[in-house]
Image (spheres, rainbow, N blue to C red):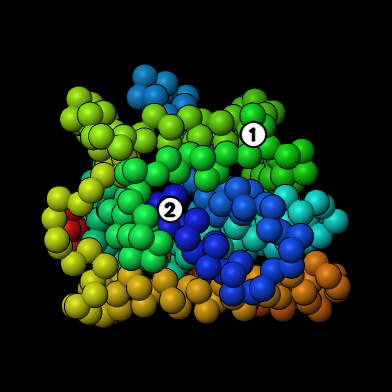
């Protein structure tokens, strides 16, 4: 998955492209938070001495199981909810679309060593935000971009809680009922701690924070493959030459079509409209970009970090 900034960038690109109504203009941070998809669950109990990873498993399972049907249920259930829930769901869907298009690239170039995936994504964040927003990621506190207050809007937290319990009852059977808000609060706290505009946290704490903390790049490697060198799909080993930008633009084309249909569906909710969205989304893994029926596993790589 691209990291927090690139997902925000992508969600904003999609919202700009679909000409969303003014109703959504005051929901920016809910869009940005939704654009993190299942990732907030990975930040629960992020301190290394906290061993309970039960809520983290929700993030993992959402990336790999029932991907299409879970999103369709979010879209359908949110049709009668408030603008914050709708903005959140749009963001969540954009997360899936960007992940499924770019994850094989990220896996191939980051490999499977601990924290290398996150390190590569943080590098991509820094390049993309400088390229498209002239923003220095290490100087800009990203936790402010996902801050929607002390707790989530009730429509948002209730929707996500209900759907996760419905789809994955065994995963949530022994965790606190407030697991959605707990993950949100810990993600916000983690990015507050990782914000390091002067670099002293990275210097003092080293690998405890450096793979996750945005910093100026120390290398001029072609991380985005702008030279279009050959790389191989992380699950199929099929050769590719796309740059990250190419994959981002392909995701953007998909996102514009799908999110336009979502807005139409919420204006006029019919089974036909929902079925069209389901057809466009398919049932594709966030992680491999392939249909879940293929049961593909990421295994190929040539790390550059």
Please tell me how crowded label 2 is: few (under 14), some (14-19), or many (20+) other residues with Cα within 10 Å: many
Residue at 52% of width from left, 79% of height from top?
Answer: 253
The residue indicated by pointer 1 is 149
Residue at 86% of width from left, 73% of height from top?
Answer: 268
Of callouts 2 and 1, the N-terminal one:
2
Name the one closer to the observer, 99 or 248: 248
> Relative to residue 175, is residue 200 drawn left or right?
left
Q: Which mark is residue 5?
A: 2
Q: For numbered disc 2, what is the local secondary structure?
A: helix
Specify the quadrant of the image occupied by residue 204: top left
Specify the quadrant of the image occupied by residue 141: top left
Q: For numbered disc 1, what is the local secondary structure?
A: loop
Q: Is residue 64 visible?
A: no
Residue at 31% of width from left, 35% of height from top?
Answer: 196
Residue at 69% of width from left, 69% of height from top?
Answer: 20
Residue 100, horizontal then vertical, whole percent: 46, 66
How far apart are labels 2 and 1 at the CA level?
19 Å
Tell me whether the residue at label 2 lies in contact with that at label 1, contact meaning CB atoms closer than 8 angstroms: no
Residue 272, horizontal then vertical, whole percent: 81, 79
Residue 57, horizontal then vertical, whole percent: 50, 39
């Amino acid at each position: 998955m691209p990291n927090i900034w690139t997902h925000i960038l992508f969600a904003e690109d999609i919202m700009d492209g679909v000409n969303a109504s003014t109703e959504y203009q005051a929901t920016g941070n809910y869009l940005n938070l939704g654009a993190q998809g299942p990732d907030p669950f990975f930040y629960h109990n992020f301190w290394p001495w906290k061993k309970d990873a039960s809520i983290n498993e929700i993030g993992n399972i959402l990336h790999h199981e029932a991907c299409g049907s879970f999103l369709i249920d979010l879209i359908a259930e949110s049709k009668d909810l408030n603008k914050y829930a709708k903005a959140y769901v749009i963001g969540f869907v954009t997360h899936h679309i960007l992940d499924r298009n770019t994850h094989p690239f990220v896996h191939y170039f980051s490999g499977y060593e601990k924290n290398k995936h996150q390190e590569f994504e943080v590098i991509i964040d820094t390049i993309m935000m400088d390229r498209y927003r002239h923003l220095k990621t290490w100087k800009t506190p990203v936790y402010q971009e996902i801050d929607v207050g002390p707790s989530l809007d009730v429509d948002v937290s209730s929707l996500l809680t209900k759907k996760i319990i419905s789809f994955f009852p065994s995963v949530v059977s022994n965790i606190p009922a407030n697991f959605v808000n707990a993950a949100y609060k810990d993600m916000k706290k983690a990015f507050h701690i990782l914000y390091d505009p002067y670099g002293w946290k990275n210097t003092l704490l080293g690998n405890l924070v450096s793979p996750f903390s945005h910093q100026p790049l120390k290398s001029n490697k072609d991380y985005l493959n702008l030279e279009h060198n050959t790389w191989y799909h992380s699950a199929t080993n099929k050769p590719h030459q796309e740059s990250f930008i190419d994959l981002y633009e392909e995701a953007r084309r998909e996102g514009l079509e799908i999110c336009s249909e979502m807005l139409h569906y919420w204006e006029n909710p019919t089974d036909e409209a929902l079925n069209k969205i389901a057809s466009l989304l398919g049932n594709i893994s966030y992680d491999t970009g392939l249909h879940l029926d293929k049961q593909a596993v990421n295994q190929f790589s040539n790390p550059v970090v």
